[in-house]
Amino acid sequence: MDIFKGQNLIEFSEAFKTNQDCRLYLSKVKWEFGYSCRKCEHIGAQKRKDFSRTCNKCSYTESVTSGTLFHKVKFGLRKAFFICFEMATSTKSLSATQMGVRYGVTEKTARLFMHKVREAMKSSETNPIDGNVDIDEFVLGGKEKGKVGRSYDSKKKKTVCAVQLSDSGKVKRMYAMKIDDFSAQSLVKIFDKHIDQKAKVRTDQWKGYRPLFKNYNITQIPSDHGGNFKALHTMIHQIKSWIRTTYSWVSEFNIDRYYNEFCYRINRSQSKKTIFNNLIVRMVQADKINQHQIVCA
Ligand SMILES: [Zn+2]
């Protein structure tokens, strides 16, 4: 299929003039590798005008949005596509308030849909980072953490962050996730999800990493106030100022979703040309998530 490429907003609005254009695009993504009925697995179907398909055997009709994160979008697929484009291609994206104003939907509607997009941006966890990896923790909504013992202040949102570095010390990939505290049991979570056991990991001299020595190749060096982890600390600074300036406040419950969004864009900065299509494929493949999973807590 012809996928949409690039970051040009004029070209994008030409490619997606109507909701019907978006439905056609979704149908191509959804059935790129062929149709099979979700009820009876029959492979023959009638195509309908809205690009949904009706099974020739059991007559079940599947819309292009059913089973995708576009399911039950009430404000029109075209607006949904534009919000996806904005979130995938702009460096910092927009707050829900700004997005609502720009696309003529309420702030609440924008926020809910944007969380669905963040869900699609979540790492598949199938491609852990290896090579040279630096890891450190930080807190949101407070001063820089003091290196003399980690702050256990329960009000601050604690995060562990890992970057994979190129030979020249540039950030290739990045992951961040919320943790309850700075103990080994909490820190190990980012290792389990995102770090290859063969990776050469560097951390500062925090004792919480020591129990992980037996399973991972970890070298501890003095932080020198972040000077020994420059690229990592630049990313930490960016993610913190992005959250502070774009969102001002994010709930503990949703914080990982914002990290997903930030890291998704960083990790695809080399493939910006196809990033919109990549996001649409993820939106189509992702399991439908219910509204209550987004708004609770
Ligand atoms: Zn069927």
Image (tube, helix red, strand yellow):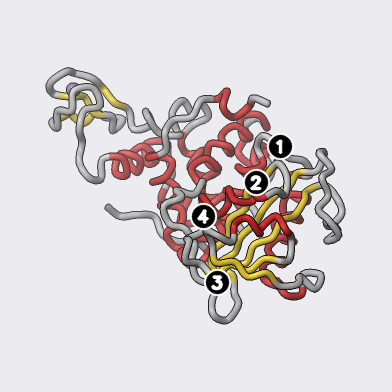
3D distance between C-alphas at marks 1 and 3: 30 Å
Q: Which residue is mark 3?
A: 132
Q: Earlier in the sequence, mark 2 or mark 3?
A: 3
Quadrant in which ligand 1 is drawn: top left
Placement of 36 over or under 160, stated as above or below? above
Q: Earlier in the sequence, mark 1 or mark 2?
A: 2
Q: Is mark 1 within 8 Å of ligand 1?
A: no
Three-letter amino acid code at disc 4?
Answer: His
Q: Which residue is mark 4?
A: 194
In the image, which is nearer the foreground, mark 1 or mark 3? Answer: 3
Q: Which residue is mark 2?
A: 186
3D distance between C-alphas at marks 3 and 4: 13 Å
Three-letter amino acid code at disc 2?
Answer: Ser
In the image, which is nearer the foreground, mark 1 or mark 2? Answer: 2
Q: Is mark 4 within 8 Å of ligand 1?
A: no
Q: Which is more toward the observer, 181 or 48?
A: 181
| 23 sits to left or right of 93 | left
Three-letter amino acid code at disc 1?
Answer: Glu
Give me the residue at 59% from left, 61% from top.
213
Placement of 261 over or under 46, stated as above or below? below
Q: Which mark is residue 252?
A: 1
